[in-house]
Image (tube, rainbow, N blue to C red):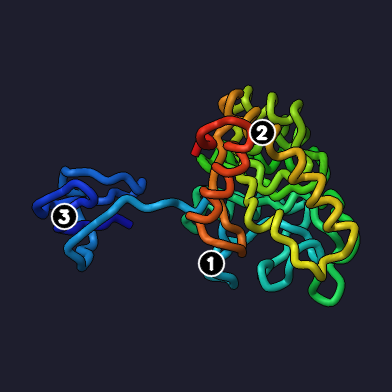
């Protein structure tokens, strides 16, 4: 899909111009054949939410997770381990560029997670899936909240989503491979007071480590992406990332 618009570019423009957004999402000044004409008289740069759940159901991208290991409303179809690579490549055939694998998750009881997170697929299955997706021209994002980050990076995943058990060795591996990190701080650090005591302890410990982890990621050159998950706003997430890094003397994270 591509778009065309005649509008004034904010904040510095003073007269309208013909603009196009090509199929790669890039703003260009050369005509794009077949572009859909958009209404409006002004355009402004926007912020991209790198991790969000705006829609569910078969019309949305399907995360890769086995039955009973993810929120039912977000998992319209389970991905058995023996079909993981095939179904992941199928997501690309439907028009996606990224595949999201739920690399760990608690068992789900009555529609809700119960107990600590556990690995959902074998390392060999993840590695084969990543290789198949890369061969088809796609990338892989991995939901992970356990200490499996390093193993996932070695398997070739392109981004770590949440990464609440991130450590220095994992960040150094990510710097070598080019994998990105989407911490989703608004979601993972904003537990309600009614959350279980064990969960609140984990969040408190993670908060203590973040002022070390985020600056280290920036120094190593690990891309840090802003994502809201299901909480807060993208502007609020950026502000939180910056605030955590500023506590350690840095101006802002590498967004």
Could you tell me which secondary element the residue under label 1 belongs to? loop
For residue 5, side relative to residue 85 (left or right)? left
**Picture coordinates of residue 121, whole percent (x, y):** 81, 48
The Cα atoms of the two marked residues, 3 and 2, are separated by 42 Å
Q: Earlier in the sequence, mark 3 or mark 1?
A: 3
Q: Residues within 10 Å of mark 1 (few under 14, many from 20)?
A: few
**Are the two marked residues, 2 and 1, in contact with CB atoms closer than 8 angstroms?**
no
**Picture coordinates of residue 91, whole percent (x, y):** 56, 55
**Picture coordinates of residue 173, whole percent (x, y):** 69, 26
Name which residue lies at 79% across and 65% down: 67
Label 1: which residue?
Answer: 54
The Cα atoms of the two marked residues, 3 and 1, are separated by 29 Å
For residue 5, side relative to residue 78 (left or right)? left
Q: Residues within 10 Å of mark 2 (few under 14, many from 20)?
A: many
In the picture shown, does residue 127 fall above or below 5? above
Foreground pick, 241 / 180: 241
**Are the two marked residues, 3 and 2, in contact with CB atoms closer than 8 angstroms?**
no
Q: Earlier in the sequence, mark 2 or mark 1?
A: 1
Name which residue lies at 77% across and 57% down: 80
Could you tell me which secondary element the residue under label 3 belongs to? strand
**Picture coordinates of residue 41, whole percent (x, y):** 17, 63
Label 3: which residue?
Answer: 8
Could you tell me which secondary element the residue under label 2 belongs to? loop
Q: Nearer the viewer, mark 2 or mark 1?
A: 1
**Are the two marked residues, 3 and 1, in contact with CB atoms closer than 8 angstroms?**
no
Label 2: which residue?
Answer: 156
Foreground pick, 43 / 87: 43
For residue 161, side relative to residue 105 (left or right)? left
Q: Nearer the viewer, mark 3 or mark 2?
A: 3
Name which residue lies at 77% across and 48% down: 145
């Amino acid at each position: 899909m591509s778009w065309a618009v005649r509008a004034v570019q904010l904040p510095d423009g003073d007269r309208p111009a013909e603009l196009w957004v090509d199929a790669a999402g890039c703003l260009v000044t050369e005509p794009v054949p077949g572009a859909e004409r958009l209404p409006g008289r002004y355009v402004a740069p926007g912020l991209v939410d790198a991790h969000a759940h705006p829609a569910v159901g078969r019309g949305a991208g399907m995360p890769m997770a086995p039955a009973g290991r993810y929120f039912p409303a977000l998992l319209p179809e389970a991905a058995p381990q023996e079909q993981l690579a095939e179904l992941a490549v199928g997501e690309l055939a439907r028009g996606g560029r990224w595949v999201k694998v739920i690399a760990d998750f608690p068992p789900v009881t009555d529609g809700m997670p119960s107990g600590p997170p556990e690995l959902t697929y074998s390392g060999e299955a993840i590695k084969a899936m990543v290789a198949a997706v890369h061969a088809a021209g796609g990338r892989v994002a991995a939901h992970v909240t356990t200490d499996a980050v390093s193993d996932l990076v070695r398997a070739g995943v392109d981004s770590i989503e949440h990464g609440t058990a991130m450590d220095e060795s994992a960040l150094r591996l990510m710097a070598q491979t080019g994998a990105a990190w989407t911490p989703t701080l608004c979601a993972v650090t904003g537990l309600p007071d009614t959350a279980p005591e064990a969960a609140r302890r984990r969040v408190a410990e993670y908060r203590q480590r973040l002022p070390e982890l985020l600056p280290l990621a920036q120094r190593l050159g690990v891309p840090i992406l802003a994502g809201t998950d299901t909480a807060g706003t993208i502007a609020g997430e950026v502000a939180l990332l910056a605030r955590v890094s500023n506590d350690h003397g840095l101006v802002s994270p590498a967004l």
